[in-house]
Image: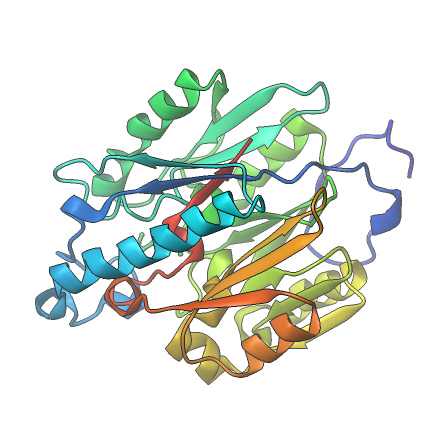
Amino acid sequence: MTSRETFKVYQSGKLPFIINDLKRREEPLKVLMCNPEHFDIIDVKNIHMEGMASSLNKNKAIQQWDDLKSIYQKLVVEGLLKELKVIDGAKGCEDMVFCANQSFPYLTNSNEKTVWMSKMRHASRQNEVPFFEDFFKNLGYTPKHFKQTDLFEGMGDTIPHPGKQLLYGGYGHRSKTDAYEELSKELNVPIIALELINENFYHLDTCFVPLSETQVMLCREAFTAEGFALIQQCFDDIFEIPMDEAIQTFCLNAHVVTNNYTNQKAAIIQVGSTAAKDALEKCGYKIYEVETSEFMKSGGSVFCMKMMYY
Ligand code: ARG
């Protein structure tokens, strides 16, 4: 397949391309966070939130968020990241701190900064989206709105292959494949749609962490056999993380950043994992362990609490 051909969504079988032949994609190196002032647990949007409403320790949550922010600040000072911005949480938007979900920023082939705005599953979360649309508009991005789908949760479910124009799209809980059909057509990028079959892993970013062009860590039980077979075609090394570790530590919600200009690699991960830390070390990441226990009660950890942008 040549780059002039049209790409689409792939859900099973043999892929008509090899990773090496795909176009290069620049990695975003700027980070956005949303402050947790209005963070709360008031309902059950995912299985991790069951019975958690009364157990949230807000002061502890704020401290944990501040600690995570300090790590990002340090990575900016060290030159691994380019910039950190913080958007204010809004009253009534109790999940807005999870700012990986409201949008999907993408640099097109013609170098246009676009941002695809999410169609979130829960009504209260839909209210978060316009705040992010404004943020990106102010940075000169062109906001894009899906015509086809009613479910798409941004970077929570849509994860790029490192350095390549290829996307992985989780579906089954918070996003639908018709979103990927539209995205693939509009951006002319191949998208590998991966059905998520275990409710603990309701977003792709809870079970799948690409580490380099050839390496990925994941929890196999989150995927179908067809999905796993597609992943096997895209990576040489697959580090399988035990399901218990992935559920209990949210280690597959780690945030890994590689700066190809400075050759620095950092991974920020919830404290307590072993297999995932091992994989990160093997892949040359400098590891920063953080405590995100209060946010895990809401079903999220490091990866969900930031958005990378250009
Ligand atoms: N309580 C939030 C929800 O259920 C958590 C979102 C976590 N984000 C993520 N990308 N996994 O929507």
Q: Kindly indicate the quadrant of the structure image that contains residue 51.
A: bottom left
Image coordinates for residue 172, horizontal then vertical, percent: 47, 56
Image coordinates for residue 23, horizontal then vertical, percent: 81, 36
Q: Is residue 45 visible?
A: yes
Q: Is residue 53 left or right of residue 23?
A: left
Residue lying furthest right? 2
Note whether 234 is above or below 150 in the view shown.
below
Q: Quadrant of the N terminus?
A: top right
Note whether 152 is above or below 282 in the view shown.
above
Residue depicted at x 32% and y 63%:
299
- Choose between 11 and 287: the one closer to the eye: 287
Note whether 275 is above or below 286 in the view shown.
below
- Choose between 116 and 192: the one closer to the eye: 116
Residue depicted at x 13% and y 40%:
92
Residue lying furthest front? 77
Image coordinates for residue 13, horizontal then vertical, percent: 78, 59
Q: Is residue 135 left or right of residue 18?
A: left
Residue depicted at x 57% and y 58%:
266
Q: Is residue 203 left or right of residue 13?
A: left
Residue lying furthest left? 54
